[in-house]
Image (cartoon, rainbow, N blue to C red):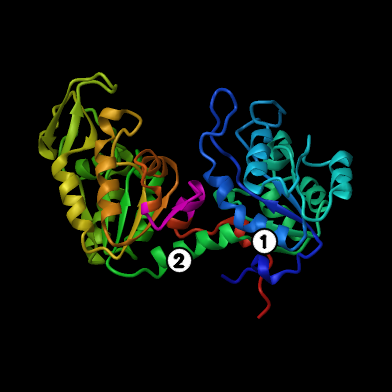
Amino acid sequence: MDKLFIQDLAVHKKRVLVRTDYNVPLDENGNITDDARIRATMPTINYLLDEEAKVIIASHLGRPDGKPNDKDSLKPVAKRLQRFLGEKVKVIMADNCVGPTVKKLIEEMRYGEVLLLENLRFHLAEEKNDPAFAKELAGLCDVFIQDAFGNCHRKHASMTGVNSHVPSAAGFLLKKELEYFEKSVNNPMRPVVAILGGAKVSDKIKIIENLAKKMDKILIGGAMAFTFLKARGFGVGRSLVEDSMLDVVDNLMNLSRKNGIKLYLPVDFVIADEFNERAQTKIVPYQEIPEKWFALDIGPATTKLFAEALQDAKTIVWNGPMGAFEFDAFSRGTYALVDAVTSSHASTIVGGGDTDMAFHKAGKTHEVSFISTGGGAFLKLLEGGELPGIASLSKKKT
């Protein structure tokens, strides 16, 4: 990476603004149900505290559309940070992220303390990438640290604008995300296998095109498999298909063959007469999906096929569930693949969202090499794209 890292900058006794992604799930009572994103930033925060910096943390939560409200407040995050940091470190919760009150809090806080700013998205200027708002945020600090990997694909004021006013660098989490991605996708131990699921080919087209040049095997599951099957001339019942993508998918299959990449498609499915939990179900080969039925999960023969394809893998990259994961009846294929992945000896990187949730529900998050904190950002990297939140950081001097 040609960008500055936190250890490249002088942060001792400085005011340091850290952009984090604390967009954590909350229950109906406002309690945090998964604090993985908070825990992931602790190496950066602890490093700055050891350097006796004034640690000012900025984040977003939810989609408040510029309207302050209790539901999207970062107050639960402040409590969790205090729990992680213990009694020796004071965590202060601001009632805003800019303005004279915030400036006064920063002036009065001691070095070695933490100030959590209120939700950035309580201001419309954040998502509009308003230069004036970015400049106001920059006025709070001497140094800016980017550690919000999960939001790095967005051109928001705190992501791309603050950097132009003060020295900026990547935090420990951001560096870890990029290092794991580099060694899993761009410079992997081989054989390297990609597992791709999810609903739409159109959402993953650039990813498949990019990975068709880099992987040794690609396993296709989820609803997007039906567009591949229909492109090969098979009926898929009422399963989700993108007819506009049939030619594109045909070209992808040709590209994979040309590049010598083995593309695996499901060979059987769990099908249902209705799209709901209580539907009648049965298992059929891929050639025999009835006209009025939905295929909602991969079947046992596919699970075995995919598991065998993973046996010799040295690196595995996974994004997207194998079925309608929101229903227990159609989540078994995904869980079976979780077992296959964690039983392998491969270095494994899992990309956010439902895939992350599957490993959490299976209690196997500690049995994979790395689970990315980013959904959209991870997908953008898989496409081979540039992340604005990283591109705008200060470059190393050559």
Which is more foreground, mark 2 or mark 1? Answer: 1
| Image-quadrant location for residue 343 | bottom left
Point 55% across, 51% down: residue: 40
Q: Which amino acid, mark 2?
A: Glu
Q: Residue at x 67, y 61 (%)?
A: 47
Are there few (<14), some (14-19), or many (20+) residues within 10 Å of tag 2? some
Q: Earlier in the sequence, mark 2 or mark 1?
A: 1
Where disc 2 sits, the SS reads helix
Q: Position of residue 44 (x, y in %)?
A: 64, 58
Percent from the top left, x then y, of residue 111?
81, 55
Looking at the rendered structure, which numbered label has been put on residue 182? Answer: 2
In the visual, does 261 lie left or right of 395?
Answer: left
Q: Residue furthest front?
A: 87
Q: As rendered, which of 140 and 31 lies closer to the eye?
A: 31
Q: Is residue 378 magenta?
A: yes
**Quadrant where the N terminus lies?**
bottom right
Find numbered disc 1 in the image and state the secondary structure of the residue it sits on: helix
Q: Which residues are magenta?
A: 367-380
Q: Amino acid at mark 1?
A: Tyr
